[in-house]
Image (cartoon, coloured by chain):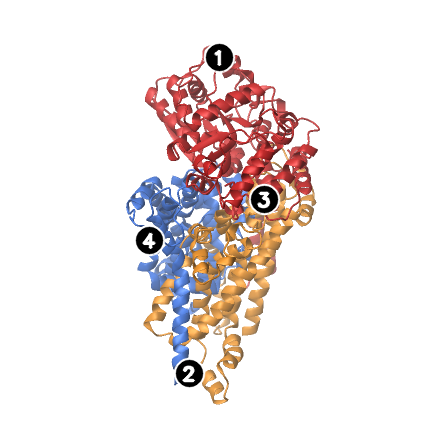
Chain colours: A red, B blue, C orange
Amino acid sequence: MAGRGRPGRAGAALVIAMGTLAAACAAPGSNSPQPAATSASPQAAAPTCGTAPITMTGYFETGFPLPKALTTEFSKQHPNVTWNIREDQFAVITQNAPRVLADNPPDLMRLPQVSELVKDDLLKNLDGYAQSFGWDRWPASQLEQLRLGPGGRPRGEGSLYALGLNVSMTGVFYNKKLATQIGMSAPPATLAEFDAVLAKAKSAGITPIVQFNGGATGGLAFPLQNLMASYGPPGPINDWIFQKPGATIDTPPNLQAVQHLERWIKAGYFEKDVNAVDYATMMSRFIDGQGLFTFNGDWESGNLDKQMAGNVGFMLMPSAQEGGKPATMSAPLTFGIAASAKNADCAAFFLNWVATDQRAREIGVEVGGSRPMGPADAYMPEVASDTVTASTLAAGADLAEADGAMDFIANATGAIYAKSWTPNLQKLVAGQQTPQELLKAVQADYASQIEGS
Amino acid sequence: MITAWREAWTGRALLVLMMAVTILPFLSLFVTALHPSGTYPPGLAWPSDPQWGNFGKAFEAANMGELLKSSALIVLGVVPISILLGTMAGFAIGHLRVVGSRVLFVLFVLGLTLPFEGIITPLYYQIRDMGLLNTRWAIILPLIGLFMPFSVFWMRAHFVNMPGELSESARMDGANVWQLFRRIHVPLAMPAISSLGILLFLWTWNQFLLAIVLVDDPAKRTMSGALGAFQGQWGTDIPLLCAGSLLILTPTLAVFLIFQRHFVKALLQGSLKG
Amino acid sequence: MTARPAGVRSSHRRPAKRRSLVGWLFVLPALAFYAVFVLRPIALTFQYSLYEWDGIGPSTWAGPANYGKVFTDPDLFDSLVNAFQLIVFFSAVPVALGLAAAATIRRIAASRLALVARTVLFLPQVIPLVAAGIAWSWLLASTGVINQLLELVGLGGITRAWLGDFSTALPAVGMIGAWVLLGLCTLLLLAGMSKIDPSLYEAARLDGAGAWREFVSITVPSLRQEIAVCVTVTVIAALASFDIIYISTQGGPGNTTMVPGLQIYYLAFSEREVGTASALAMVLMVLVIACAFPIQWFAKDGER
């Protein structure tokens, strides 16, 4: 080896390299721009999209045609507006939400759980728009889940940070042909009757429930929360989801619900490979007639009416007690505007249009299958009475009457679904988690996530 | 003789088996891609009515034209600059042996095995602060840096074996260092440079993590990152997803088949030295 | 180096010094890119790892607490354990199978078939890992080809959704990695074998050594360096795995396939625990270096 450097000089390379590193000395976050807190500025006249050409950026969920159907119709009515839409699966949106909103703000975005987004001032406060468009005169229950206190806690009251494209609701779809085959003439009225039907299907060689629980999406949360609603009142569950102080998921009725779910798993009421089934696979299996029941939401009503016309029914989850009030997950299909969105006014105008335009409301029901949001006396499209869309809309009305709506347990915190419910439910399926420990584990994660945020 | 014959045939059988296993996933993608879009075809079953149109549909759905352009732009940004800078540095460290070249060399070698996940978080904030998020520069610039250890390492290995007399005689003729580099050493280094180019092309084209973290718009990503987005968007339609995956891996396959001799050699050497 | 008269040497001293400065100009651009996009982020990762930061708001000093979390929080620690388990599949399987395959194939190295094989076995190296992940997720699904084949050979009883089963998900992901790396290892070892002096084998034959003795006492020791390379490349691939798992299982079911790379991504960008993510990143980087360099040194020393 020739030309070896003398030790004194040899360090020069490092010195230069270190020089560039020295820039990294301030604590992280101390110099990053803080988005200005968005306060509600009262609007004189309701904003519009104007007449100049405008390109709206959207970030929507894969596999759900409603938002795109609406934006297409909107551009038809307002030709100056074009849309640049990116799509991802919901789990990915959940992961990306904070940094997309902060660093690459879309005008309109399908939102996951909003508490932490509000805490970090990533979402536009919509109070001003609510005033100028008159959203505050809509039935209050529609907007309850979208209101947040200062700093994002608790949810259920405070300023408005998002709006729904409609109000979706979950329950149990069933295959009518298979139901007749095992002698189920009417939907079961109690949980015990439901159990009996499931057992009958099982012994008839029919998969009783097709559900998804694979990858990052623990779909057994659907039957679980429905079972929770069968055993107990929705209030405490809602408090937990809304992060009210002292709320816990580890309650006796919820334990009964998890135990019931575990009995279903052990009895083989779900598909054997449920831990590897994703949402799309579940849908294709149910449509293909490979199972009697599936727990899902009315966003599939339109789709099911098309693909299984006349062969699909819907029921709300029966209560454990006879004559118990129905309760289930029901939430707006949440869309929001980034705090620093370029075209916030147009986005707000679009959201208002979705709720009030006649054609938009028709699309909402036909494509989306759920009740549109908006004033109580707004135009309601006609739906053929023999469709499952009609039964879900009717069930939605029953639910509203019984005040049985609650948000989804997966929406309690930003990470609770992927980090806690999904792995724990997958473990429950594999026999590696007990009901008691499952609730304890979820509650512990919840506590640390709330404390950490 | 009999043992030799038997050995040859077990060798052959083993080889065929390994090739079959290697091909199987491609075959499955291909057969599945021909099923009607939206269905869940079970296993390997030739469809009764092959949907060749799925490839056209996927081409459009994946926006392949844009993707090809984007990946090509990224490769054009990364590969020439990495080669130029890597060759220059390798020349200085391996041949000129500048003062401190040992320390420099060790410094670069330390980065040789770096897992990209290790620095992806600060890289995100750095790129954001540079205002480059969501542009192709967000992939190009970090990749040049991340490929630098290997490029320098690779080119140094070449230059270390170049006899010093070569330069001495050129210097006698009055050539300065740049001329020496440009006229004498770069032409001699062409085999090493082209192997490096092939490896860098492949690694850039297939880069996934940087693409999904730093660029949201699939049309500005690498092929691999775009495939990730395509799965996000069309993951619910298996035949279309399979058709799209095949389309997206076709360009690398094509380049590979054209330059296969070079490719295999480069990859083998690349891992031996790396 | 040839000896030179002292006068010549001293007359070259000044230009040599200048050459060194010019030489530095040659290194500088490479160094700049490396410093800005690799060294600085490494330093920042270390710095972040000492803070608690959600990536948006202000940060608070946390000292070594994040490192404590990496080793005590079962979710984080298990991801490291999983990565080491993946080594068995990413590393041991391709190297062992590759050795066996190469030893057998060597005899027909010149045939047409072997030439075709060189091309075919390389395909997995060339395609994006993402595509491998998509293809294999489909093969390993409950209605996939693997189960179809198993049923064909009368093993219908063990069919399952391989990526959704707690006991098989990690091995299944590992097999995808083995598929990607097997061809590379086989060809590397094959190339190494062609360099072994044939007279060694002849001598062994004369001594009456069987194929196995030959393999153990000649082939394997001569391939020391190639084996070390295979092990290094595959061990790094296992520890730093991301693409395949991101596509095929997202770490599930129940975290059984969670690996540090994916955990860092989730922690940093979805759970926004940048400090914890960075601590895990530091641990991962140190582990990779701690695994890679000894293997390399071991091989180099053996050679000299």
| Label 2, label 1: how far apart the Cα atoms are | 91 Å
Is residue B155 found left or right of A317 in the rendered image? left
Residue B53, image x, y percentages: 28, 44
Mark 4 lies on a secondary structure that is: loop
Disc 1 marks a residue whose amino acid type is: Ser
Disc 2 to disc 3: CB gap under 8 Å: no
| Label 1, label 4: how far apart the Cα atoms are | 60 Å
| Label 1, label 3: how far apart the Cα atoms are | 51 Å
Disc 2 marks a residue whose amino acid type is: Thr
Q: Count residues near mark 2 (Cα–Cα under 10 Å), then give few for <14, some for 14-19, many for 20+.
A: few
Label ID, residue A132: 1
Q: Which residue is mark 4?
A: B46
Mark 3 lies on a secondary structure that is: helix
Subunit ID for the residue under disc 2: B
Q: Is residue C137 above or below residue C118?
A: above
Of badges 1 and 3, nearer the viewer stands: 3
Dot 2 and dot 3 within a common chain: no
Disc 2 to disc 4: CB gap under 8 Å: no
Subunit ID for the residue under disc 1: A
Q: Which residue is mark 3?
A: A265
Disc 4 marks a residue whose amino acid type is: Trp
Residue C289, image x, y percentages: 58, 58
**A188 and A229: which is toward the camera:** A188
Based on the displayed image, in which of its 4 quarters is residue A308 positioned? top left
Q: Which residue is mark 2?
A: B3
Residue A303, image x, y percentages: 40, 32
Q: Is residue A339 above or below residue B20?
A: above
**B102 and A80: which is toward the camera:** A80
